[in-house]
């Protein structure tokens, strides 16, 4: 499978716990994006990377959220001290580069439930 | 007002019907327009991708963009039960800092 992959697909955690999600983009895609989607809403931008550099963070990304892409390949999104409001689908997407005419391709998402 | 507004749903049609899905937007800098299909508890799947104004056809799907009216549409001909899903419009400005802005999505149900 050469698409975007995400792990885990589902995560149930208790409030206050830390969670980490992983995204593997399409091979040789330099741009990697994270979005969050709550029930009945469209995805909302969180942050993006150009290779290993994190270039922009949305105001939705509070201090409890941190994202990394250490070698410019896979990325991780960590949420510390989870809150019930963090319950959502976390989506990862990739594209070849910013100047590519190709758009973003999404992974299957990680569904987080905070009890 | 949100940057991208999508017609509220849900929408239920009989099999074989022509479906029209619409979005309006306020940011005149948007240049690239997309429609994604999302099945329940899955990630969005790209359906159509268009640049600037005009029409694009792919099988039973036609995407229309009218930049002067800030309005985009997706038409589905001969709708099938397998088309039942949530449809999301998305757009971006292009350029180095570009990222997608989505509509809320509309859930379509095609009745056999």
Image (cartoon, rainbow, N blue to C red):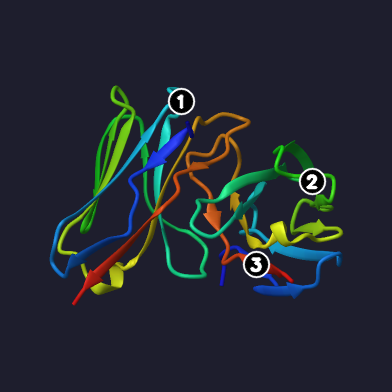
Which residue is painted at 79% across and 44% down in the image? Answer: A62
Query: Residue B80, position in %: x, y?
Result: 22, 70
Q: Which mark is residue B27?
A: 1
Q: Nearer the viewer, mark 3 or mark 2?
A: 3
- Circles 1 and 3, Cβ within 8 Å, touching? The answer is no
Query: Residue B99, position in %: x, y?
Result: 57, 38
- Circles 1 and 2, Cβ within 8 Å, touching? The answer is no
Which residue is painted at 60% across and 37% down in the image? Answer: A98
Tell me: residue A104, above or below residue A7.
Answer: above
Q: Quadrant of residue A5?
A: bottom right
Q: Which residue is mark 2?
A: A52
Q: Quadrant of residue A18?
A: bottom right
Q: CA distance from mark 3 to mark 2?
A: 22 Å
Disc 3 chain ID: A
Q: Nearer the viewer, mark 1 or mark 2?
A: 1
Q: How crowded is the residue under tag 3: few (<14 C-alpha within 10 Å), some, or many (20+)?
A: many
Query: Residue B102, position in %: x, y?
Result: 48, 44
Farthest-out residue, bottom: B112
Q: CA distance from mark 1 to mark 2?
A: 30 Å
Which residue is painted at 21% across and 73% down in the image? Answer: B111
Query: Residue A51, position in %: x, y?
Result: 74, 45
Instruction: Report the quarter where the C terminus of chain A lies.
Output: bottom right
Q: CA distance from mark 1 to mark 3?
A: 30 Å
Q: Which residue is mark 3?
A: A110
């Amino acid at each position: 499978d050469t698409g975007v992959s995400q792990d885990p697909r589902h995560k149930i955690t208790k409030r206050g716990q830390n969670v980490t999600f992983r995204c593997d983009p399409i091979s040789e895609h330099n741009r990697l994006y994270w979005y969050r989607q709550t029930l009945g809403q469209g995805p909302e931008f969180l942050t993006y990377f150009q290779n290993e550099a994190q270039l922009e963070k949305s105001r939705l990304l509070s201090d409890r959220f941190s994202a990394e892409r250490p070698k410019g390949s896979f990325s991780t999104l960590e949420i510390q001290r989870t809150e019930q409001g963090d319950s959502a689908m976390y989506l990862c997407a990739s594209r070849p580069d910013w100047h590519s005419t190709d758009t973003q391709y999404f992974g299957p998402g990680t569904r987080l439930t905070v009890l | 007002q949100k940057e991208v507004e999508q017609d509220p749903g849900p929408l239920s049609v009989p099999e074989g019907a022509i479906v029209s899905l619409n979005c309006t937007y306020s940011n005149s800098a948007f240049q690239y327009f997309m429609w994604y299909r999302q099945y329940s508890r899955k990630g969005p799947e790209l359906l159509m991708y268009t640049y600037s104004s005009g029409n694009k056809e792919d099988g039973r799907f036609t995407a229309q963009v009218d930049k002067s009216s800030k309005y985009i549409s997706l038409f589905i001909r001969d709708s099938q039960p397998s088309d039942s899903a949530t449809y999301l419009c998305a757009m971006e400005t292009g350029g180095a800092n570009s990222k997608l802005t989505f509509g809320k999505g509309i859930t379509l149900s095609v009745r056999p």
